[in-house]
Amino acid sequence: MSGDELDLEQEHLTELYAHVDALRAQAADRVEAGGDPDTVAVWKAEVSRLDGIEHGLCFGRLDMNDGTSAYIGRIGVFREADDEQLLVDWRAPLARAFYTATAADPQGVRRRRRITTRGRAVVAVDDELLDSDGTEEHLVGEAALLAAVTAERTGRMREIVTTLQAEQDAIIRSAERGVMVVQGGPGTGKTAVALHRVAYLLYTHEHLRNRGVLVIGPSRIFLDYIGQVLPGLGENRVVASTIAELGGVLEAKSADPDAERKGSARMAEEVAHAIRSRVRVPDEPVEVTFEEQVLSLDPATCRRAVCKAREAGLPHNQARLVFQDELVGSLVGSLVERMESLVLSEDGRPLDGGSADGRLSAADRNALSAAGVIVDPDDDAPREVIDSADRDALRASLLADDGVLGALDELWPELTPEQVVTDLTGGGPRTSADVPLLDEAAALLGHDAAKAVFGHVVVDEAQELSEMQWRMLMRRCPSRSMTLVGDLAQTGSPSGASSWGQVLAPHVADRWRLAELTVNYRTPSEIMAATEDLLAGTGLRPPRSVRSSGEVPWLERVPRGSLGGLVGEVVAGHAEGQLAVIAPSDLVSELASAVGAGLPVDLTDSVVVLEPGQAKGLEFDSVLIVEPAAILGGGGFGRSDLYVSMTRATRRLGVVCVGSVPEPLAGMASREPSSVVR
Ligand SMILES: Nc1ncnc2c1ncn2[C@@H]1O[C@H](COP(=O)(O)OP(=O)(O)OP(=O)(O)O)[C@@H](O)[C@H]1O
């Protein structure tokens, strides 16, 4: 590439950064100026948005057949003086051809240029001419793509905006409405695509910026791993959460022997039943003491109040108000009757012979005051003995009375979600399987009014969610605008999905669409070949690898006493990128101390030791799997745990067995003396 071309692109890039710097300075000035906190927060967010796109601001250029051209980058930039568009946002319709044009379908593009930058300097430009022989191509910008997928891992996911492929682009730009499931094998870019789709939807749909987008991930480790992607795309308005965090439980334990039962949709009935059964209709009259008088609530009155409250169709704690209203009304009635019997004869005439015109006499007032009804001394207008204002006053006194409230609580208690779930599962520390139960209870009790709902929800590793977790998420997304990404072959939770249709039917019937990703960008073909026997008989096919690495995965058997030594040897020989040792949970701390790896895991360390469940969604340059037989035999989903573990590597895979070699791995090559998972 000629130096002239580099100079030309450098000139353009410098102009772009000058504009971005001016925008940043303007936003920083507004922050400095202070004022209304909401406005300041908006300007602060703008500064951090502009900081986020600093790296790789412009990465492409399209030259069209009609002689026009456009630069493609992370945000749109206009020159104010002449309204000239200096940079087209990658999400704009005009940028689409950058990802989808091929020689067979050039879409008016003559030349696609990839611009590589380091800091603010242009370091390379690579051109593709699309007017060649028109042969079908599958990968757009193959060289740049391969450079991206073979680059060393850092423990933080990168955005892929410069090398998105056509099948990924189609999903990212798919309409916002409804539920879209993205099914794809390991390494097909599901997570990356889901995050780029979020950025696209926020750019395209104004209303989502106000209503919010929620991204659900399987663990905090995973959310930290993907945490840089959206800021790198200029988006910092997204809520990222695990299901437990969404339920406000930050420290939920993940292991729960009862998780499968707690995840079943039948628990929704049980939660509802636990709440209903706290309401009591007595068989005998209930005595209520109020200001030294004993009143009585008979069973029929209580039953009527319960029916009325249930008919209101309100959540339990709100329906309690209807119930309370009914019963207090009945108590007011009894009290009024009692008071009136003190001052009126049976046929309603004042007992003291009172005044003929209906005014209260002094004797009436004394009798009323003795019964607890205070009447304004100046008010001697004609009136009923106990009027509606007196009734209201009585009602207020009853509602302020501990004895009365205690009696009401006995019959229709005000409940908290925690009380309901304790009734069902017992006390003790909460696990993540309890969170959807707490959430279900909150909804039925009416405790969820303050809970946020979102305009769009993205769920990663969606195959892992239980039926109860789906119910919880659906409550957060009344519009049912959702992107769900996952892989049925990787389901590792006993409550997880074996069919998308089954999972979604209770919520959207068959109104959902399926998109598939078919190319594995992460795992080289040699490693995918080693997983083939694991999938045999499942009806699931592994995705096609985009490349081979030339490195054959190996397997070695060692006596138990030599395990730490061998793992230590592999770790010592590891020199490039990141290495993950993935082992059954009972070996993790032993191995972590043998190789000096930190616990809890810090994904930016060069060597990490993890259990299979924690490795979900992550990737490393090299992976060493320890004791696959124990992973495979660890519960009903061992096969998928092992499949997930094996497919985390971008380059090299080694397997160490202490016990037997699992049948599906029997065909793996032995370790050459020189082969370490470097
Ligand atoms: N078009 C692309 N250009 C560059 N890198 C890509 C592209 N698509 C995917 N990748 C890379 O491939 C790797 C796998 O992507 P990702 O983690 O999104 O896959 P996944 O389908 O979610 O995998 P899994 O189900 O195994 O967790 C990532 O490093 C991602 O950056």
Image: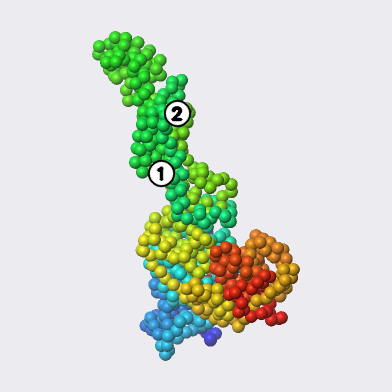
State how far apart marks 2 and 1 are (Cα).
22 Å
Q: Position of residue 434 (x, y in %)?
A: 52, 51
Q: Is residue 452 left or right of residue 249?
A: left
Q: In terms of depth relative to the viewer, which is nearer, 610 or 48?
A: 610
Q: Which residue is mark 1?
A: 315
Q: In terms of depth relative to the viewer, which is nearer, 667 or 626?
A: 667
Q: Is residue 579 left or right of residue 222?
A: right
Q: Position of residue 87 (x, y in %)?
A: 45, 72
Q: State the count of labels.
A: 2
Q: Amino acid at mark 2?
A: Val
Q: Look at the image and tell me whether residue 334 can be seen.
A: yes
The label on residue 275 is none
In the picture, the quarter occupied by the C terminus is bottom right
Q: Amino acid at mark 1?
A: Pro
* Image vertical order of residue 93 relative to residue 427, above or below: below
Question: Counting other residues with Cα less than 10 Å from the Cα at mark 1, is it few (<14), some (14-19), or many (20 or more)?
Answer: some
